[in-house]
């Protein structure tokens, strides 16, 4: 409910943007996405996250969320897990069109082009809702100006958890402008680990046993590949070890490298 003009905003909420929710979609019983208004003048780089959440009395209850919408879009999109007893997501999952969310309008993050050296292939490894920052990256024209090939991977436990990613890629293919921009540069490799599907297994296993090289035409190459990784802590550590074994150096905003990592945020 938007704040009435006469109500004074509690001190803890000042500086936060109050944004109206414009759409919600429940993908599985564990995941949902929603869009909201974008504040005027709010700029972000593809792959960044912002603190968003709800009002909890006079205080905000905020968590880090990757912005899933492209940086040129009029609205902001977020993709979230539902944690049954999570302080924020247990409430956030009941969002309806017209509700308000709060956002600290200071986006940050390392899954950005600025943190990577120039390269030929951009490989985006994700598990679960870790695909969210890459939903932005794969719709950014800069991605295709900088790289000849973009490979997005997502590994989930069950088949339906891949729907968000499949829908995203289908949307790109159906969009006249985006499809022209992306051409045949984008590949989506979607795998499951706990439900039968056409492609199974963790991407870390695919990298180790040669299935990744077979599917994409080449093993990881520190000279020409640039990598972004987003998932659980354990997933990040395993992917990081594989990148380092391939001779890659981790990058940051101040010192670009061959790969960057960021935890997928949960309650
Ligand atoms: P698995 O089913 O073999 O654990 P979660 O929901 O636990 O975050 O997992 C999401 C997906 O990430 C699952 O398919 C899971 O596979 C996979 N996964 C979990 N840990 C790792 C890891 N250390 N490296 C690669 N993939 C992982």
Image: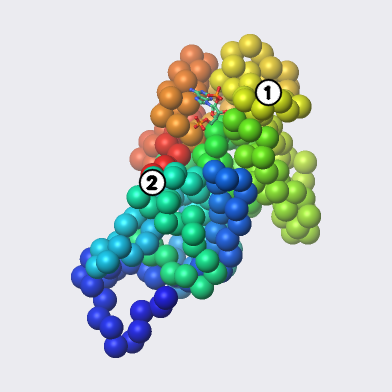
Q: Secondary structure at mark 2?
A: loop
Q: Position of residue 162 (x, y in %)?
A: 65, 39
Q: Is residue 186 above or below residue 71?
A: above
Q: Which mark is residue 200?
A: 1
**Counting other residues with Cα less than 10 Å from the Cα at mark 2, is it few (<14), some (14-19), or many (20 or more)?**
few
Q: How many labels, in total? A: 2
* 121 with respect to 197 (left or right): left
Q: Is residue 14 visible?
A: yes
Q: Which mark is residue 86?
A: 2
Q: Is residue 155 above or below residue 183?
A: above
Name which quarter of the figure residue 157 lies in: top right
Residue at 70% x, 48% y is 167
Q: Nearer the viewer, residue 126 or 218?
A: 126
Q: Position of residue 37 (x, y in %)?
A: 51, 69
* 220 with respect to 81 (left or right): right
Residue at 50% x, 18% y is 242
Q: CA distance from mark 1 to mark 2?
A: 29 Å
Q: Secondary structure at mark 1?
A: loop
């Amino acid at each position: 409910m938007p704040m009435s003009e006469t109500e004074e905003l509690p001190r803890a909420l000042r500086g936060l943007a109050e944004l109206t929710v414009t759409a919600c979609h429940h993908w599985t019983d564990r995941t949902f996405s929603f869009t909201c208004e974008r504040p005027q003048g709010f700029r972000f780089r593809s792959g960044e996250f912002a603190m968003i959440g709800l009002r909890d009395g006079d205080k905000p209850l905020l968590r880090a969320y990757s912005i899933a919408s492209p940086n040129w879009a009029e609205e902001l999109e977020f993709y979230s897990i539902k944690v049954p007893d999570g302080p924020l997501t247990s409430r956030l999952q009941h969002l309806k069109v017209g509700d308000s969310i709060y956002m600290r309008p200071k986006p940050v993050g390392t899954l950005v082009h600025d943190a990577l050296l120039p390269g030929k292939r951009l490989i985006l490894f994700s598990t679960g809702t870790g695909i969210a920052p890459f939903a932005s990256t794969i719709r950014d024209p800069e991605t295709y100006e900088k790289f000849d090939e973009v490979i997005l991977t997502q590994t989930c436990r069950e088949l339906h958890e891949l729907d968000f990613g499949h829908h995203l890629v289908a949307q790109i293919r159906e969009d006249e402008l985006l499809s022209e921009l992306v051409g045949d540069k984008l590949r989506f490799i979607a795998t499951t680990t706990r439900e039968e599907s056409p492609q199974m297994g963790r991407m870390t296993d695919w990298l180790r046993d040669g299935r990744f090289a077979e599917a994409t035409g080449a093993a990881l190459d520190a000279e020409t590949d640039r990598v972004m990784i987003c998932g659980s802590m354990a997933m990040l550590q395993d992917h990081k070890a594989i990148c380092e074994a391939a001779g890659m150096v981790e990058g940051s905003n101040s010192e670009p490298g061959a790969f960057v990592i960021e935890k997928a945020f949960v309650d």
